[in-house]
Amino acid sequence: MFYLFESDFLGLIPETFLLLGLSALLGYGVWYEKGRESDMTSHQLWIGGLCLVFTFILLCESPLMNMILCYNTLIIDGMSAFLKSLILISTLCIFGLSFAYLPQERIKAFEFIILLLLATLSLMLMVSSYDFISLYLAIEFQSLGLYVLAALKRDNEYSTEAGLKYFVLGAFSSGFLLFGASLIYGLTGTTNFEDLGLLFTGVGPTDLFTQGSIVVGLLFLSVAFLFKVSAAPFHMWSPDVYEGAPTVITAFFSIAPKLALFGVLIRVFYLGFFDFLFSWQQIFFFCSLASMVFGSFGALGQVKIKRLLAFSSIGHVGYMLIGLATGTLQGLQGIFLYLLVYMIMTINAFSVVLSLRTREGEPKFLLDLKNLNLKSPILAITLSITLFSMAGIPPLAGFLSKFYLFFAALDASLYSLAILGVLSSVISCFYYISLIKLMYFHKADEVELKPILPIDSQKGLLLGLSFFGILFIFLYPSPFFLLSHAAALSFS
């Protein structure tokens, strides 16, 4: 009965191509490289990168822009297209960072690329999920790849610990998701988000017991998703996993899963449970506030670079939850704009960290940034501008995205959240600027200046493009406003 799914397969051409591409790459790795001693890392990365580029082209040129597929389990719309594009671009950037990193760390490119492409495919399916069953399958598909990627350096005990901790807590949060979804299914008889939205429209359940039970189910669902995006107070796994995983994998963890999961959060709560706005709004209000506070104060005591970036990521999640808590179209647009700017800033930060590698290895501690201005003035100014942007200093891109979210909160009468967001931004300036102090104002005679290894062309290109984006988005933000506004409108 192929004809039943004929148009469905047309809608899923980008995902199908990516699946076929990684299958071909799997065969290439198994058959062509078997027994070969030569290093084929760059070949595999180029092929994987081409798969992502062609998938991105197919996504942009798809004739089907609004469609429900596979018996109401998947959906294609402007929001999914926007987030899938960001996921593909971020994964392509991770490939660019990996050209020099994989040989230096002696990581096998073959399994790294296959797992990364599988995780990307599952994230794309997650963004398109329109039903709890397809959502759970996509989340588990993605999680299995990420567990292995976190523990990819098998001879490193920190990497093994990161993979194990991520696996245990990821399975724990999946249990919460299953329990919440099964509770809602038992009370309503449906797992489809649109059906749930129609069921609750206007009146909601008249039985107080049913209404209370659905709120409990929503609580379990929100806990599961907040675990996945590492929002406080469910953030405890994040710094350890970020610290133990290989740095390029840490960069992937920081960006791609958050892009997909915020799409899922919007889809579930805005489409399926919008009539319970006042119930889940309080959850996200509290978690947004907690994430901003924990992210800002937790980063103050850190001495390692990746742990600092992990707490910084927790703080950024807190800002994005402001947009989710507003329950408005302007809040959605603020989230999409923030996700775009956050992706650019994070890629730039990790590109700089990986560019600071010496013969002893990559920098691990904040003190390794001492006198960076003397070793590499260009990297020092690049990292400084990125840190200012993360702190929300005008006129950089980070200020633009925070400014828009705070105004969305004010429009939704969430004055306390907007004020506390500004205050936490001020606190975060302290540890960002302390890094700049280390780079520029540390006494030169106190440290031996170790020469930095030459930067490869792929990393240099990423540094240049992301730095350009951080500097100039504020000067001409219209295309990014239009993209984020179109994504928000397509959802509404």
Image: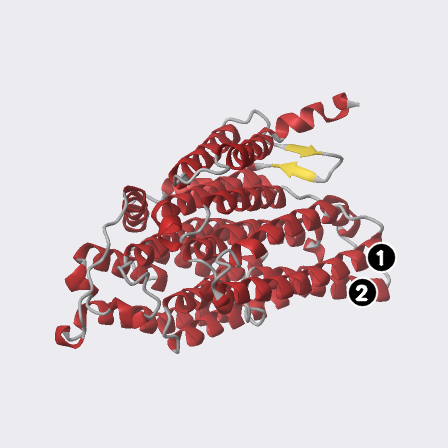
N-term-proximal mark, 2 vs 1: 1
| 329 or 118, nearer to the observer | 118
Q: In the image, is 409 to the left or to the right of 391? A: right
Query: What SS does tag 1 mark?
Result: helix
Between the residue at mark 2 and the residue at mark 1, the CA separation in whole angstroms equals 8 Å
Amino acid under disc 1: Leu
Q: Give the residue drawn at x 18%, y 70%.
A: 448
Q: Is residue 484 above or below residue 150?
A: above
Residue lying furthest left: 445
Which part of the image, by quadrant, shows the C terminus?
top right
Q: Label 2, on which residue?
A: 213
- Say which of 54 and 39 sits in front: 39
User: Where's residue 357, x and y in %?
Assistant: 29, 58
Q: Residue at x 26, y 67 (%)?
A: 369
Q: Secondary structure at mark 2?
A: helix
The type of residue carrying mark 2 is: Ser
Nearer-the-camera pick, 21 or 334: 21
Q: Position of residue 453 (x, y in %)?
A: 24, 54
Q: Which residue is mark 1?
A: 187
- Tell me if label 2 and label 1 are in contact, CB under 8 Å: yes
